[in-house]
Amino acid sequence: MISVRVIGRLLDYPDSELFQHHHELITVLETASELNLQHSARLVRFISTLCARPLLDVQAEYGEQFDRGRATSLLLFEHVHGESRDRGQAMVDLLAQYRAEGLELDVKELPDFLPLYLEYLASGTAERVRCGLQDIVPILALLAARLHQRQSQYAVLFDALIFLSGAQVECDALQPQVAQEARDDTPAALDAVWEEEQITFLGEQGCASAQQAVHQRRFAGAVAPQYLDVAQATQRYKGA
């Protein structure tokens, strides 16, 4: 699906090349048969509005939207495994999946970077695109809800991906949960995460207790990664 490739490009870091060729992306979307008129029009409007602004402003907004905090991270496994050891194995498995399809990464991005994953899906059949999107629908729905709550224009991209997955998902149902989340991209929240902790010389048990207390204090009130059971949640969405 060409529209998935376009959305992946729009979710990547905005650069001068995107601005120079944005009319070509609009042309592609206007003729993409997999999109309905509503989503096509929203995506075209997104591109037109985005590329009418100064590039430096758009780049700064992108960084604030996706690189500050963890709640809207474009790294898929951040929302599934957080910082657990399972995340490393999931990276290895996804990279092996890419290589099995004859794809080798020539960029520095991690395998679970959403634009990269979308490019991988778009290189295959329409069925692979749908199945691949359905695998991450719980994450897409969560991100869409959070972006809508923050009134971000990027939310329309996630709405379109959910539509293309074919899954019946009501992102509005997540709004109560999202509304109760503490923002993790504020200066205070970021300082709490990155602050340096004083080293104390305690016994082994004391160190463990102290580290746990430090962790709880640093992340108190912040948005925690969603340890989603992707398989179970996806099955629920498919059956909806």
Image: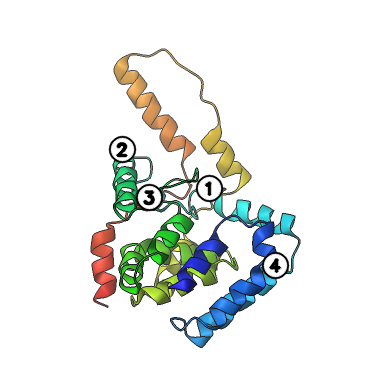
Residue position for label 3? 77
First in residue order: circle 4 vs circle 3: 4
For discs 4 and 3, the disc positioned in front in the rendered view: 4
In percent of width and height, residue 123 lies at 40, 64
86 over 121 or under it: above or below? above
Give the Cα distance between marks 3 and 1: 14 Å
Q: Find out whether the residues at labels 4 and 3 contact each other: C-beta distance under 8 Å.
A: no
Give me the disc on residue 51. 4
Give the Cα distance between marks 4 and 3: 30 Å
Q: Nearer the viewer, residue 164 or 230?
A: 164
Taking the spot 38% from the left edge, 63% from the top edge, the residue there is 121
Which class describes the residues within 10 Å of circle 3: few (<14), some (14-19), or many (20+)? many
Residue 73 visible in the picture = yes
Residue type (three-letter) at the residue carrying disc 3 = Phe
For discs 2 and 4, the disc positioned in front in the rendered view: 4
Give the Cα distance between marks 2 and 3: 11 Å
Give me the disc on residue 69. 1
For discs 3 and 1, the disc positioned in front in the rendered view: 3
Say what secondary structure mark 4 lies in. Answer: helix
First in residue order: circle 3 vs circle 1: 1
Residue type (three-letter) at the residue carrying disc 2 = Arg
Which class describes the residues within 10 Å of circle 1: few (<14), some (14-19), or many (20+)? many
Q: What is the quadrant of residue 202 in the picture?
A: top left
Which class describes the residues within 10 Å of circle 4: few (<14), some (14-19), or many (20+)? some
Taking the spot 60% from the left edge, 79% from the top edge, the residue there is 27
First in residue order: circle 2 vs circle 3: 3
Give the Cα distance between marks 1 and 4: 25 Å
Give the Cα distance between marks 2 and 4: 40 Å
Residue position for label 2? 85
